[in-house]
Image (cartoon, rainbow, N blue to C red):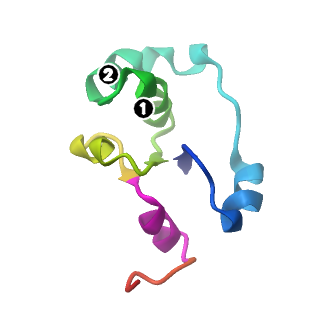
Amino acid sequence: MFLFIGNTIPVMDKLLKTVVKVAREDEYSGFLPQANDLSPDPDDVDFFALALKLNCSLWSEDKRWKQQSHVETLNTKELLERLGLISAQH
């Protein structure tokens, strides 16, 4: 499971429309204290909290997100490789 953040690329549009679910804060609020410690930006705490609750990866180009080891963060290239849309040799 992946939590997608930011702009999408065209090949992902259909996929995103099938997997995106809106989550209410009360669904992941128990993870906010830990997420607050992990997130490099206060504006991103909710993304980290939801990823912790869902035990899923995040997709972002923000290199700071990789400075923590509790929530896997993939950049676009890594995500496309994981999904088998490009080879790892690109």
Where disc 1 sits, the SS reads helix
Residue 55: % across, % down:
45, 41
Relative height, residue 52 to residue 63 (above, below): above
Q: Earlier in the sequence, mark 1 or mark 2?
A: 2
Residue at horizontal 42 percent and vertical 66 percent from the top: 78
Q: Along the horizontal axis of the image, is 36 left or right of 77?
A: left
> Label 1 crowding class (10 Å Cα cut-off): few <14, some 14-19, many 20+?
many
Residue 68 shows which numbered tag? none
Position in image of residue 89 (x %, y %): 37, 86
| Residue 55 appears left or right of 15 | left
> Helix, strand, or loop for circle 2?
helix
Q: Main secondary structure of the magenta part?
A: helix
Quadrant of the snapshot with the C terminus: bottom left
Residue 14 lies in quadrant: bottom right
* Residue 34, label in figure: 2
Residue 44 vertical placement versus 61 (above, below): above
What residue is at 46 percent from the left and 46 percent from the top? 58
Q: Are marks 1 and 2 in contact (CB under 8 Å)?
A: yes
1 relative position to 64: left or right: right
Residue drawn at x 29%, y 40% is 70
Residue linked to disc 1? 48
Does the magenta-highlighted stretch encompass residue 80? yes
Q: Which residues are magenta?
A: 74-84
Question: Which residue lies at the image location 52% right of the left edge and 80% below the top edge?
Answer: 86
Tell me which amino acid carries mark 1: Phe
Rendered location of residue 40, percent (x, y): 29, 30
Q: Dot 2: few (<14), some (14–19), or many (≥20) neighbours within 10 Å?
A: some
Query: Number of labelled discs?
Result: 2
Residue type of the residue flagged with mark 2: Gln
8 falls in the magenta region: no
Where 9 falls versus 20 (above or below)? Answer: below
The residue lying toward the viewer, choosing from 61 and 80, is 61
